Image (tube, helix red, strand yellow):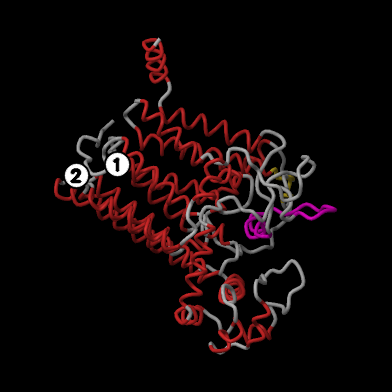
Amino acid sequence: MKKFIYNCLNKFSKFVSPALLATVLAAIISGILLFVPPIHGLADNGDFYRSILSNGIYRLPTSYSQYSDFVITKFGIMQYFNENNVSVLSSQTIFIQIALLLNKLFYSRTIFDIRFMGLVYYLFYLGGIYLLTNAFVRPYRKVKSYVMGLLIVFIFADSAYTLYFNSFFAEPGMFILMLYLCASIISLARNIYSRRWPMTFLFFISTILLITNKQQNAPLALSFGVVAIGIMFLPHFRARRMATALGIVLVLMSGVGIYKSIGSEIVGANTFQTFSHGTLLETSDPTKKIERGGVDGQFALMRNENYYSKNYATLDPGSKYVKKHLMDKTGFAWIVRYYAGNLKQFNNLLDVAAKDVTAVQPRAVGNFVRNSGHKPGEQVKYFTVYSSLMGAFFPGKYAFDCLLAIGFIAVYSVGFYLDIKAKRYMGILRFFLIFGLMTVVVFVPIVSIVGDGDADLAKHLFLVPVSLNMSLLMFISDLINHTLWNTEGDEVSE
């Protein structure tokens, strides 16, 4: 019997690699969620307009609300000159335009079906899953390699991630680009391919597109600029180090460029929500605290209010009065000074952020289409075991996240030191990747709290769980392959 099972596994491994198995499983799991009626996705929380209007897409008139409760599947395609300026500069436009092209070729030139958006993300996503799994396991086809492939599916095919595909949020592009970014670095570290330039090129393209995907990603240029430093240590790469240095400069410039492109309206909205969803929270007496900062205490009444309010607002955030007496006084410098003088409150807000680190699936919007038999705002439970477990058991403390980051960096610094001495490079590239990912874990919550308070915090922290999960996968892979501190013999060529 054992021999029969061994023969079956041997034959299976000859035809199905771990990467192919992971890709097929991810395709089936996510394909059912996205394309089998009734389809699933994410309802609009009011942010879709930033993506759709500048790309010539608009909401069709309906007799019911198109926000929050149900996924809207059909949108209109403008048949006339689009007078809407590009309110938000974003590489997300590339994905939307590809979806529009496919929609016009195979469905309609006047009606846009959200499933074409899902299809574009779905295809890029499967390519990312294949490359990532291949980077972790190639050239081996042992049982542990298939286990690693299944683990990647268990984590990254979770519906909390793939639900985003049927939406106009920017997060699915960020998720997919992270898969390519990490897969390219791991492939370079393990010398998976005989030529290094394709993976190097893929890394820089993915990184620049990721940073420019969303304006809040501007600080990530520093994190991934650090990751890119590892490429400089590749052997026989002297002639291309100048090109690598140029790539790092482009990464940093993309961060500066996307930051500079932030419009005044978005700056105003972020400033207001930093005040109403940040400085006024986690404190029993916000009035006295803001008065000490030179702001009229009456503005404490605006606690938890949004810039784009769906209901009655205490004061119009866009009014001249609010601009003069609040917005002009509470810029970035004021926020920094305020939190510097109220460190306990700031730490409490960081703990609030830490609780949202695992909340990948937005709770404020529904995942089902109308007339599917589900309640308004109801959430999908299909293939969400991993995200549910993380949400239930992952400690919601910012100090723990920092300690975890320090632990990862410390563990991989040993491999970095040993490979520097032995003139190997796998441990070096891994270290810089881990270091970059951990800066995301530590600094993105700070940037989110300072930049927008706790408004849409789970979405702002989206890359934090992705970074943690990627680091966890790398750690498990190194443990089962015995390469955590000894990379000798693991650098293989095609």
Q: Is residue 15 toward the left or the right of residue 121 in the image?
A: left
Q: Which sits in the foreground, 421 or 226? A: 421
Residue drawn at (39%, 20%), measured in percent from left and top?
13
Residue 141 sits above or below residue 107 on the image? above
Q: Is residue 64 on the magenta stretch?
A: yes
Residue drawn at (51%, 74%), measured in percent from left and top?
345
Q: Is residue 289 toward the left or the right of residue 108 in the image?
A: left
Q: Residues within 10 Å of mark 2 (few under 14, many from 20)?
A: many
Q: Which mark is residue 88?
A: none
Hey, what amino acid is under mark 1?
A: Arg
Residue 447 sits above or below residue 475 on the image? below
Residue drawn at (21%, 35%), measured in percent from left and top?
489
Q: Residues within 10 Å of mark 1 (few under 14, many from 20)?
A: some
Q: Which residue is mark 1?
A: 196
Q: Is residue 77 toward the left or the right of residue 471 in the image?
A: right
Point out residue 427 in the picture as x, y percentages from the top left corner. Answer: 25, 46
Point out residue 326 in the picture as x, y percentages from the top left corner. Answer: 61, 84
Q: Which sits in the foreground, 225 or 79? A: 225
Residues at marks 1 and 2, CA–CA distance in whole angstroms? 16 Å
Q: Is residue 493 toward the left or the right of residue 354 in the image?
A: left
Q: Which mark is residue 424?
A: 2
